[in-house]
Each structure stands twice: as structure tokens, then as C-alpha cells.
Image (cartoon, rainbow, N blue to C red):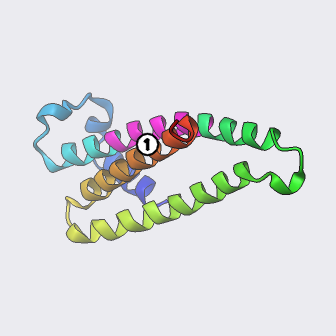
Amino acid sequence: MRNLLIATSLLAACPALGEDKIDCANAMAQMELNMCAYQDFEKADVELNAVWTQAKAFADELDSQEDEESRKGAAKALLAGQRGWIAYRDGACELAGWEAHGGSMEPMVVSGCLAEKTRARTKELQEFVKGPEQ
């Protein structure tokens, strides 16, 4: 994935930053800003994966409550939706990166977009698990 390549390139280009703790609240250099944006995305991705586990379990539970095989499919639909969402997120954020394409700020723009869209998806999945409002 392109984002992994960007993060790997950043770490390889400046090993000291990869080893030292960056103070993201006070980051000023572009390399630090890029790394902090990527760390923010990683944090959002961890949160998404935790909620995904809950959503998958909920979808499996919905399917298990159905007596007829033809009425099952929540888990399959959830997985298809997630795969489609990942493709959308990655493409949309790659496009967002074109705002700074080829520049030192591009990784920060892409990572920021990934984090924002990942948090939005996390909220969507949380709403799914919560179920319809009473």
C-alpha cells in the first residue's frame, strides 16, 4: 500500500526520528509533522479495528438469529461494505495528497485524510453495533 511505503520511506530517511519520541504537540519540522500525522492515523486505525471486531460479532449474531438461510447475510454485507470503504478511503486520500503532490507535505496530507476518514468509519460501525434508536 502506498501509505506504508510513505511511512517506511520517512523512517528510513531519518532513523533518529524513528527511534526518538516526537513531541507531536510541538512538532515544527515537516518530517516531524509527517510522522505525527501518520501516528495519528495509526491510532485511528487501531480504534477502527477494535470496533470492527464488535461489528463483526454483532453481524454474526444477527445472522445466527435467522432461521432461514436466505435471510442471513449481515456478516457478508458488512465485509463487502468494509472492503469497498477501504478502497474508497485509500483512493480519496491519495487524491487529497495531490494538493501537495511531490512535496514534503504530501505524506501529512494523506495521513491526515486517512485518520479523518477512519474516525468517521469507526463512528459508522459504532452506530451499527448500537442498533436502531429506540
**In the rendering, at what x and y percent does residue 66 appear?**
83, 44
Q: Amino acid at mark 1?
A: Lys
**In the rendering, at what x and y percent does residue 40 appear?**
32, 40
- Say which residue appears at 27% left-offset and 29% top-offset: 20
Q: Nearer the viewer, residue 36 or 52?
A: 52
Is residue 52 one of those drawn in magenta?
yes
Quarter-of-image position of residue 44:
top left
- Magenta portion: prevailing SS class: helix
- Say which residue appears at 69% left-offset and 42% top-offset: 59
Answer with left or right where residue 109 lies relative to residue 76. Answer: left
Q: Which residue is mark 1?
A: 123
Dot 1 falls on a residue whose secondary structure is helix
Quarter-of-image position of residue 102:
bottom left
> Quick check: 82 above or below 60?
below
What segment carries the magenta color? 40-53
Q: Nearer the viewer, residue 121 or 20?
A: 121
**In the rendering, at what x and y percent does residue 33 appear?**
20, 45
**In the rendering, at what x and y percent does residue 73 appear?**
76, 53
